[in-house]
Amino acid sequence: MTLSRVSAALAHDLGRSQFIALVYAVFDPRSGRLRLANAGQLEPILVRGRQIRYLATPGERLPLGLGVERRYDELMIDLQPGDRVLFYTDGVLEAQNVSGELFGFERLEALLRRLNPGADAIERLRRDLSRFTNGIGPADDVTVVELAMTVPDR
């Protein structure tokens, strides 16, 4: 509902070739429930143990501002202790090495599967990207946000 209203307002204000891509997420730390709506952004990744799951929202996923009548459905998921959700922009996947090879989904997934519980995914990804690109600056923005459900102390 929120994204639909924002998209309609932006459709009047943005130029014909302008739009905004984002994932709208609301997290309740007491229940562990995460609600997502996606407006043209890459699917966040749920990491549960060594398992990877892309969090694809149902329905329309066009960026904001592309028309007035848009409906963005939500995905609801209950996170468990130890789960992490990674939100990232395409600059992560499109980072290139000196040979022009892309970092890509496979490297990102492999990195996430190797993480130990409690490890900082963002710092690890920053180091791996730097090593992969050998200091070549990004061609696009690289933005990463991690939501981690901590394991309660015993």
Image (cartoon, rainbow, N blue to C red):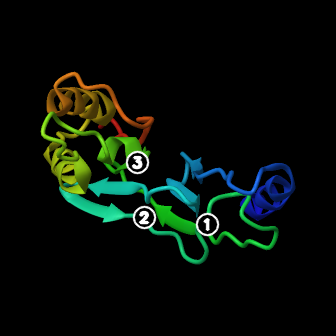
**Which is more N-terminal, label 1 or label 3?**
1
Q: Residue at x 13, y 45 (%)?
A: 114
**Which is more N-terminal, label 2 or label 1?**
2
> Which of label 1 and label 2 is nearer to you?
1
Q: Secondary structure at mark 1?
A: loop
Amino acid type at mark 3: Asp
Quadrant of residue 140 within the rendered picture: top left
Mark 1 lies on residue:
62
110 horizontally vs 85: left or right: left
- Taking 144 as reference, is 68 above or below it? below
Structural distance between the alpha carbons of marks 3 and 1: 16 Å
Q: Residue at x 28, y 29 (%)?
A: 126
Amino acid type at mark 1: Leu
Tell me the tag on residue 55.
Answer: 2
Can I make out residue 149 in this image?
A: no
Give the quadrant of the C terminus. Answer: top left
Determine contact: label 3, label 1, CB under 8 Å.
Answer: no
Tell me the tag on residue 90.
Answer: 3
107 horizontally vs 64: left or right: left
Structural distance between the alpha carbons of marks 1 and 2: 16 Å
- Taking 91 as reference, is 138 above or below it? above
Q: Residues within 10 Å of mark 1 (few under 14, many from 20)?
A: many
Q: Nearer the viewer, residue 13 or 40?
A: 13
